[in-house]
Every structure is written in structure tokens, then in C-alpha cells.
Amino acid sequence: MDLENQKRVKDLTEKYGAENVVVLIGGAEAESAGLAAETVTAGDPTFAGPLAGVPLGLKVYHAVEPEFKESVDADVYDDQIGMMEMVLDVDAIIEEVASMRKEHGKY
């Protein structure tokens, strides 16, 4: 997660409260999705950005996770994300993001 997005997440969390923020990520690889999930839950693992040492514990989901998929219109999901499900390693992405959410999430 780039430094500007880290700042946005931190600012929104301060403004609305961590319990009211959900982060939706869309990284195409499990590792990058996991790093983004770790950043918004446990803090920036590279210690380079605004979330370095800031464990927000936010709710975080990837766009291919069932929890998100079930919460949006099926036609819109299929139109915007459905094709990507065929080329992504969905199981690995879900496992990585869910493990960060379980290990570091507070909400």
C-alpha cells in the first residue's frame, strides 16, 4: 500500500473511528493483498509509511472474498470483477487476507 493511501486510511480512521471503517483491497496477488491487509490491521510492515507502528485493526476484505461478493449486486460484481476471478488465485488471496484479518483485526 503506497504512502498516500496509508495517509488516507489513517485520516479516515481518525475522522470516523476504526470501528466504522472497512478497507476493500483488490491486489492481484496473494502476497500484495496480504501486505495491504497487514498494513491496515497491524501497521506498515516496511516501517516506511504513516501506518508504521500503527495497529489500526481495521476490517479488511479483498474484492473476491465471499463476504464482499455477497454484499453487492451480482450483475455489477460479475461485470466489474467476475472475469478477474478466472485468472486470479482466489483461494490464496482469500487465505492471505483472512489470516491477517483474523490475526490482527480488532473489529
Image (cartoon, rainbow, N blue to C red):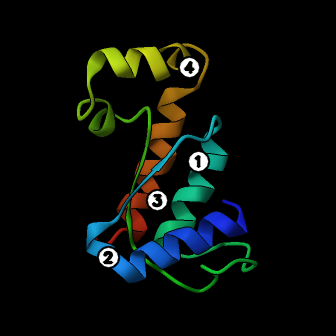
Amino acid carrying mark 3 in the image: Met
Relative depth, front residue between 99 and 61: 61
Tags 1 and 3 touching, CB below 8 Å: no
Above-or-below relation of 81 to 6: above
Cα–Cα gap, marks 1 and 2: 24 Å
Name the residue tied to disc 2: 16
Q: Amino acid at mark 1?
A: Ala
Q: Position of residue 67 (x, y in %)?
A: 27, 39
Dot 3 surroundings within 10 Å: few (below 14), some, or many (20 or more)?
A: many
Residue 77's x, y, as percent?
38, 22
* Residue in the picture at 60% in, 79% down: 51
Q: Secondary structure at mark 4?
A: helix
Q: Which residue is mark 4?
A: 84
Identify the residue under disc 1: 33
Residue 53 in the image: x percent, y percent?
A: 59, 86
The residues bearing labels 1 and 3 have C-alpha atoms spaced at a distance of 10 Å
